[in-house]
Amino acid sequence: MSKKRKISYYEIFEENLHLQDHDLEKILISFPKRVFISSPILADLIVEKRLYLLTKLYQIGIPFSYNDHMGTNLLHMACGISGSFEMVRFLIENNLVSDPNYQNYRCETPFSVALFYEHIDIVKYFLERFIIKSAIIYHTGETLLDFVKKQNNDEILKLLNQYLISHCCKQMTTYIDDPRVPIKYSKKIRSYSIPRKGKTVVQVIHYCPWCGKKLPKQLRDEYFEILEREYGIEPDLDSYLQPGFPEEFKDDTWWKKRGL
Ligand SMILES: [Zn+2]
């Protein structure tokens, strides 16, 4: 005679998922906290977009630290095939899972998952609020930008071009973000350089050390000329500290806008 198997908390949850929020809430708050860490209850609630229940669970201190066997977390899931902007915002704004660059074992990040499923609202939200690591190389050997180019979604490509910097080759894109490699990029004046030890001056480079391509023209002179001509601001590297300094000159907006 077979022994009757004990039904798990997750199975109880699954059987009652169809219930109205208030009835399911009563069941969920009776579960021990550890169940939410070891089983995908929160992941399912995210996929089902049950915001009321997620909010209640968050308010009673349930940890949102669930990861599946691939290291995929709740933010990855909120960006997935059944993902939604509302769920992403809930996780980020309550600081429950808040890193769009966090990689699972396949090197996927919440940001790359949102790109893959073409959730433009989520992609835009991440780009506006976070520094997205474009240098991440996926298990396929592609970078984020390689992937997007292949995807052929003009709207996403336009967004990424607006926010991310793409360099001449994969190596440059990777190493520019790597603190161990002494190559620096200043997006404000589009300058590639090697810092010189103990000196404040840098060695500007004109060709990529990896692929050999000529790098785009440095815009240091243009930066000062345009600031003076259009805004009457005296050329001085510290002028950005003055009140009323034009926002567009604090990063690469000014030269992208002028098509330089
Ligand atoms: Zn290169």
Image: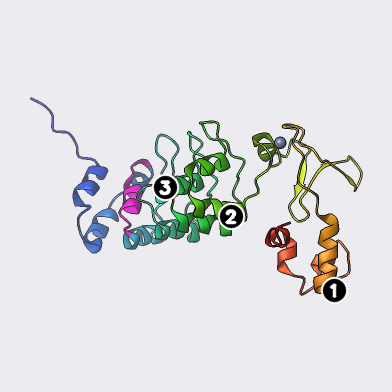
Residue at the extreme top of the image, as rendered: 1
Residue 48 falls inside the magenta stretch: yes
Q: Is residue 62 left or right of residue 110?
A: left
Instruction: Look at label 1 and name its amino acid.
Output: Gly
Q: Which residue is mark 3?
A: 117
Query: Who comes first in sequence, dot 2 or dot 1?
Result: 2
Range shown magenta? 38-50
Magenta-colored segment: predominant secondary structure: helix
Q: Quadrant of residue 229?
A: bottom right
Q: Is residue 77 above or below residue 213?
A: below
Q: Is residue 87 left or right of residue 188?
A: left
Colour theme: rainbow
Q: Which mark is residue 187?
A: none
Please name the residue shown 51% across and 31% down the image. Answer: 140
| Quarter of the rendering occupied by the C terminus | bottom right
Q: Residues within 10 Å of mark 3 (few under 14, many from 20)?
A: some
Residue 104 or residue 27, whichever sits in front: 104
Q: Which residue is mark 2?
A: 130
Between tags 3 and 2, which lies in front?
3
Q: Residues within 10 Å of mark 1 (few under 14, many from 20)?
A: few
Please name the residue shown 52% across and 40% down the image. Answer: 147
Residue 198 falls inside the magenta stretch: no
Distance (Cα) linking label 3 and label 2: 19 Å
Residue 147 or residue 11, whichever sits in front: 147
Q: Secondary structure at mark 3?
A: loop
x and y percentages locating residue 79 in the rendered image: 43, 50
Q: Quadrant of residue 177?
A: top right
The answer to whether the residues at label 3 and label 1 have Cβ atoms under 8 Å apart is no
Q: Which residue is mark 1?
A: 232
Q: Is residue 41 left or right of residue 251?
A: left
